[in-house]
Image (tube, rainbow, N blue to C red):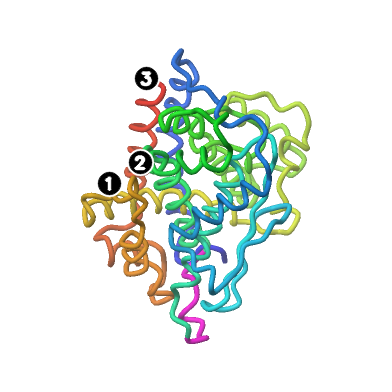
Amino acid sequence: EFETGMPASRINELFGTIQEALVPLLTNVLQSESKPSVAPLNGHFPIKAQEDLSREIVTALGYDGDHGRIDVSVHPFTMSFSPADVRITSRFSEKEWYQGVAGTIHEGGHAMYEQNLNDSGLSIDSALSLGCHESQSLFWERHVGLSKPFWKWATPKLKASFGDDFGYSPEEVYGAVNNVTPGFIRVEADELTYPLHVILRYNIERDIIEGKVDIADVPKKWNEMMKEMIGVDVEKDSDGCLQDVHWSMLAIGYFPTYLLGSATAAQLAHYIKKDIPDFDEKVEKGEFSEIKAWLTNKVHRHGQRYKSLDDLLEDQLGEKLNPAYFIDYLTEKYTELYKC
């Protein structure tokens, strides 16, 4: 229902491979004595300055504000009425600036997908799937917005927005925004632990449907898997199996789309760097138009002309969804950052 052409057998294969690689990687990262400081994230940051900064960044990336608008909400979201009217929201805290920027970039990625679909009004010119949609938001949020070149470009903007007291280097900001801190809540999870949150939920709902787990045993199963996979002890169900709205809405099978999007984003990032060898240099200079055009050519413009995400990737990149790119990306990045 949520990811056309992606059967459970295929998801089992993909997620099993990812879990097998990420659990030991997370263990190594958490045991490292070389942890980046999160000091650049914390302080007092005026909301208006954050709003202006986020608007400047997402517009530079390619969001067309003339055919949409940016507002504030309790939870960031994107709403598309047509490619000519795509609106996004974000949220901000005076105590921490990154979540506002990240939320705006994430929703901007969704919005750029919607803005670059063909404006025919036909269903074939709508987004392929939820996983495909998530790949676009995560490509910009992570493979651009969490990269070293991006913070070389964006850190001067932070200083201009927050004043001379923000005296951190691009390297310090990069380390802070990529900090790994295991926690209970999926929507607050960092890039490395987030995939395991998704796999946990998928494994439980799959086992329920297959009759291997009773509903009454879900809290116990959840807590055991959180300890085993992420290393945290869940003390109350509101921080555990009751934290999401998906199951109460009967949105069974929705969770996998988040991780399918993550893996797809990494594969797109691998191939775009083959076609645009100076990708990092462009990001560092704030030159994003060629990157957006590549995504439009490979993903946006096709709408629902493929039967599945696998079919799209195989035709446009030469191979189906391959989790190796996602695993390699996380392994190389966090092994370097945490020196482990």
> Helix, strand, or loop for circle 2?
helix
Q: Residues within 10 Å of mark 1 (few under 14, many from 20)?
A: few
Q: What distance separates the C-alpha of mark 3 from that of mark 2?
A: 20 Å
Which one is in front in this view, the residue at disc 3 or the one at disc 2? 2
| Residue name at image x 31 percent, y 64 percent | 294
Label 3 or label 2, whichever comes before in sequence order: 2
Give the distance between the C-alpha atoms of the residues marked 2 and 1, in whole angstroms: 7 Å
Amino acid type at mark 2: Pro
Q: Position of residue 272 (x, y in %)?
A: 28, 55
- Which of disc 1 and disc 3 is earlier in sequence? 1
For residue 339, the mark is: 3
Labels 3 and 2 touching (C-beta < 8 A): no
Q: Is residue 245 magenta?
A: no
Q: In the image, is 73 to the left or to the right of 194?
A: right
Query: Which residue is at the front of the view, 87 or 163?
Result: 163
The magenta segment is 120-129
User: Residue 149 shows which numbered tag?
Assistant: 2
Q: Quadrant of the C terminus?
A: top left
Give the image quarter of residue 243: top right
Q: Of helix, strand and loop, which one carries label 1? A: helix
Residue shown at 50%/70% (left/top)? Answer: 114
Residue 113 drawn above or below residue 118 = above
Q: Main secondary structure of the magenta part?
A: loop
Structural crowding at the residue carrying mark 3, measured as other residues with C-alpha within 10 Å and reported as few (<14), some (14–19) or many (≥20): few
